Image (spheres, helix red, strand yellow):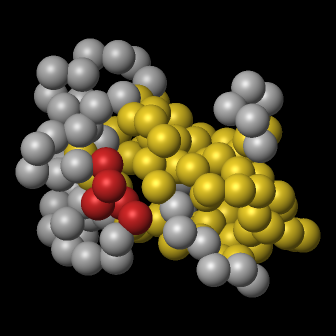
Amino acid sequence: SEVDFKQPASMRYIAYELTKSTDDIFCLRHISLDSNAEINPSIHDFSSETPEHPALSILVDSDTYWSTSNNDKTTTKRLVIDLGEIETINKITTHPRTDSVLGLPLQFKILGSNNLIEWKELSNVDLLKS
């Protein structure tokens, strides 16, 4: 999934709200941020993770990935990334895991915020509508 802004957007936090996948877990391999500045993001919060596939994995472009836990029975899974300060973002690209369709997000939203209170929807992805 790629969110390519018509004009750059400023935000400090990026949240993923995942509501439907190919099964009851969610897996994301990597998030790429296109910005004119050097960004060193961190994980602010997440609904769950597994020891083998921690949330931090999403910030590293590698073969590992973040996976929610089978024990997480919440309807909406959430992952919040902290950019460290308000940054100008041109594009956000979400990469699914490549070794399996298990945990493939089918419906999710990407939100942006400067303060963790007020959120703006950046993208509403629904692969079931295709």
Q: Quadrant of residue 65?
A: bottom left
Q: Is residue 31 left or right of residue 57?
A: right
Residue farthest to the right, as pictured: 7
Q: Where is residue 50 in the image (x, y as percent from the top left)?
A: 15, 40
- From this view, report whether residue 8 is shown above or below residue 44: below
Percent position (x, y) of residue 117?
73, 26
Q: Residue furthest front?
A: 84
Who is closer to the viewer here, 30 or 102? 30
Res 127 visible: no
Question: Which residue is pictured at 70% across the width and 51% down the height?
Answer: 12
**Which of the pair 15/23 is nearer the observer?**
15
Number of residue marks: 0
Residue drawn at (60%, 72%), measured in percent from left and top? 39
x 48%, y 41%: residue? 44
Q: In which quarter of the image is residue 4?
A: bottom right
Q: Residue at coordinates 15% horizontally, 28% vertically from top-left?
A: 70
Q: In this view, does 1 lie above or below 119?
A: below
Rendering coords of residue 82 (x, y %)? 57, 50
**Residue 61 in sight in this render:** yes
Which quadrant of the view contains residue 126? top right
In the depicted structure, whether residue 47 falls above or below residue 99:
above
Left or right of residue 39: residue 114: right
Spot occupied by residue 69 in the image (x, y as percentages of width and height): 19, 32
